[in-house]
Image (tube, helix red, strand yellow):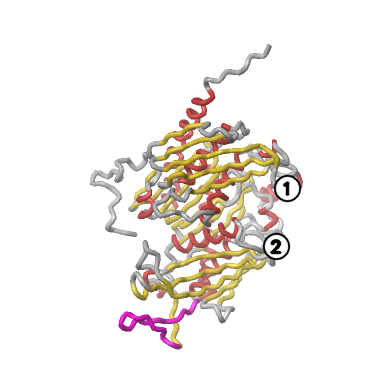
């Protein structure tokens, strides 16, 4: 029914074995198909950064740091702060990651994280404008994959959002049209929503959540669904080759929604995000 | 985003006169370039794209060759003059990402395991960009692969669905994309009923997502027909040589 073709034999054997396990609601690490690995979040571990978070999900570890500078806005958004996301797959994280400029996987990771945060309007970028059209905050979100055991997307989004939500940035005031630093005072990055992403793997007609590296090496296809809130999708990326049958899409959305709620709950617990912060 | 911009006319039509489920004028042609093994040209409104295929051929450099299948090399590239402001030469991060998703979409359909140790090259060149370049690009690339005689499970065709001022529209224009709330490019292989490329930029509810999928599917059915016609245009007249 489905083509597994194109896989070398050891991969095909692994694929078939994993599929057989999933049919029995099992996986190699003992999880059930829709179960994600436990999420651990530590924030503000880098004093020199304006915000930082380290997130682990099983054997995958991510560190995200925030730096905020002053710069000029983009011509098409004079009343918005700038935000850029960069990601690197460090050679520390896996034998398959090599030093050098970000490859297509790292660029994809950065752009998916960017999309989750930007499209969900997680940051109130209008509030970080100091002099409209001239001086705005420039938020740099840098993500490093420290250890890789599959699914670097979900912990990266969680780390980026946790670092943003707990960041303390320098305070500025405008006096006679001139921007001045307020010594010794800090402010928060205004956060409106807490987006999370959910990485799903497909084995033929079955879905698994949060695949490990060994599962990623054998799966038929995978996709990432980013959720801005419980009921709103903000980003999607089909990130590996392979067929995504129409018949499975609705189930994928349903499963990812449930996992996203779990991730967000975990995120709120760990950053003590106060609901009164929402406008 | 910008409330002052109006993207629908009084009678609910889009600014260019289209209805919500109507795509721009499409033109496809197969075999438009000489030196490559297969090629195609597509126009979607003002978007103009060439695609060319080489191979299967020897993989280069040799260490990239795979013992069990061909490798697929792909490049989605925009000409410097294809957009309003000159695009810097070289690959931008956006182009690198789109190259990846297009390559993975095509890889899904090609019987790469038929050509161990070889390589197939696909080049997509955006001559003019006016929204919908990645989807029109993969549509042209799948035609060029067919033109090169590379065995595939199916052709694929792509189109985007946008959300503009609360309404879903097929094949958003540049304006609609810029001021809209969401853009969902998707490529489908209709015969095998599968999605091969799927991205979403922007916010959709679950119901809107489902509706967007079926809107795209209807658009792609008609693109698929046009693809078959374009291939027949080139190949239907050619008769098999008689064997003595």
The residue under the point 62% across, 17% down is: B241
Residue range in magenta is A167-183
Residue B226 lies, in percent from the top left, at 46, 31
Query: Any mark on residue A94, and which?
Result: 2
Task: Tell whether B232 sits left or right of B7.
Answer: right
Structural crowding at the residue carrying mark 1, measured as other residues with C-alpha within 10 Å and reported as few (<14), some (14–19) or many (≥20): some
- For the residue pair A270 and B66, the one nearer the viewer reads as B66
The residue under the point 35% across, 68% down is: A79
The reply to whether the magenta stretch includes residue A176 is: yes
- For the residue pair A240 and A75, the one nearer the viewer reads as A75
- Extreme residue toward the top, this view: B244
Residue A61 lies, in percent from the top left, at 64, 67
The residue under the point 46% across, 35% down is: B223
- Are both tags, 1 and 2, on one chain? yes
Q: Quadrant of residue A98?
A: bottom right
Residue A26 lies, in percent from the top left, at 68, 54
Q: What residue sits right under mark 1 in the picture?
A: A11
Question: Is residue A157 positioned above or below A32 on the image?
Answer: below
Query: Any mark on residue A19, and which?
Result: none
Q: Quadrant of the C terminus of chain B?
A: top right
CA distance for labels 1 and 2: 19 Å
Observer able to see residue A13: yes
Task: Tell whether A27 sits left or right of A134.
Answer: right
- Does label 1 or label 2 sit earlier along the sequence? 1
- For the residue pair B78 and B137, the one nearer the viewer reads as B78
Which SS type dominates the magenta stretch? strand
Q: Quadrant of the N terminus of chain B?
A: bottom left
Q: Chain of mark 1?
A: A
Find numbered disc 1 in the image and state the secondary structure of the residue it sits on: helix
Observer able to see residue A254: no
Find numbered disc 2 in the image and state the secondary structure of the residue it sits on: loop
The reply to whether the magenta stretch includes residue B184 is: no
């Amino acid at each position: 029914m489905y083509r597994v073709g194109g896989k070398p034999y050891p991969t095909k054997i692994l694929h078939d074995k994993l599929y057989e396990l999933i049919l029995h609601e099992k996986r190699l690490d003992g999880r059930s198909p829709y179960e994600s690995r436990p999420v651990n979040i530590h924030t503000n571990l880098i004093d020199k950064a304006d915000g930082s978070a380290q997130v682990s999900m099983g054997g995958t570890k991510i560190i995200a740091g925030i730096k905020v500078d002053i710069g000029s806005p983009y011509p098409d958004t004079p009343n918005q702060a700038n935000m850029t996301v960069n990601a690197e797959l460090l050679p520390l994280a896996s034998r398959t990651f090599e030093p050098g400029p970000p490859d297509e996987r790292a660029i994809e990771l950065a752009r998916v994280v960017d999309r989750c945060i930007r499209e969900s309007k997680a940051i109130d970028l209008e509030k970080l404008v100091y002099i409209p059209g001239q001086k705005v905050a420039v938020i740099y979100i840098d993500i490093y994959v420290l250890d890789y055991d599959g699914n670097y997307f979900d912990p990266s989004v969680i780390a980026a959002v946790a670092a943003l939500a707990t960041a303390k940035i320098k305070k500025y005031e405008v006096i006679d049209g001139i921007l001045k630093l307020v010594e010794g005072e800090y402010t928060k990055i205004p956060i409106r929503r807490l987006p999370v992403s959910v990485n799903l793997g497909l084995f033929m007609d079955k879905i698994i959540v949060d695949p490990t590296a060994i599962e990623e090496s054998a799966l038929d296809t995978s996709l990432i669904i980013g959720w801005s809130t419980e009921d709103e999708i903000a980003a999607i990326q089909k990130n590996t080759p392979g067929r995504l049958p129409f018949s499975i899409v609705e189930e994928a959305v349903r499963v990812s929604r449930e996992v996203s709620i779990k991730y967000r709950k975990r995120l709120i617990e760990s950053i003590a995000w106060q609901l009164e912060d929402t406008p | 985003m910008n409330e002052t911009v109006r993207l629908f006319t009084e009678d609910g039509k889009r600014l260019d006169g289209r209805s919500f489920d109507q795509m721009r004028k499409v033109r496809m042609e197969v075999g438009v370039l000489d030196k490559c093994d297969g090629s195609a040209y597509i126009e979607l409104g003002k978007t103009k794209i060439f695609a060319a295929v080489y191979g299967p051929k020897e993989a280069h450099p040799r260490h990239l060759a795979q013992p069990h299948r061909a490798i697929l090399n792909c490049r989605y590239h925009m000409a410097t003059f294809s957009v309003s402001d000159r695009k810097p030469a070289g690959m931008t991060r956006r182009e690198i990402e789109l190259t990846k998703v297009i390559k993975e979409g095509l890889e899904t359909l090609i019987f790469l395991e038929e050509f161990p140790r070889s390589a197939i090259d696909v080049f997509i060149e955006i001559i003019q960009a006016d929204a919908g370049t990645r989807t029109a690009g993969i549509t042209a690339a799948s035609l060029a692969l067919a033109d090169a005689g590379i065995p595939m499970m199916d052709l694929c065709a792509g189109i985007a669905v946008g959300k503009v001022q609360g309404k879903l529209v097929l094949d958003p224009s540049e304006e609609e994309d810029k001021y809209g709330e969401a853009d969902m490019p998707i490529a489908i292989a209709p015969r095998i009923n599968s999605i091969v490329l799927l991205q979403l930029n922007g916010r959709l509810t679950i119901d809107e997502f489902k509706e967007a999928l079926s809107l795209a599917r209807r658009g792609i059915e008609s693109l698929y027909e046009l693809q078959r016609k374009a291939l027949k245009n080139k190949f239907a007249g050619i008769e098999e040589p008689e064997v003595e």
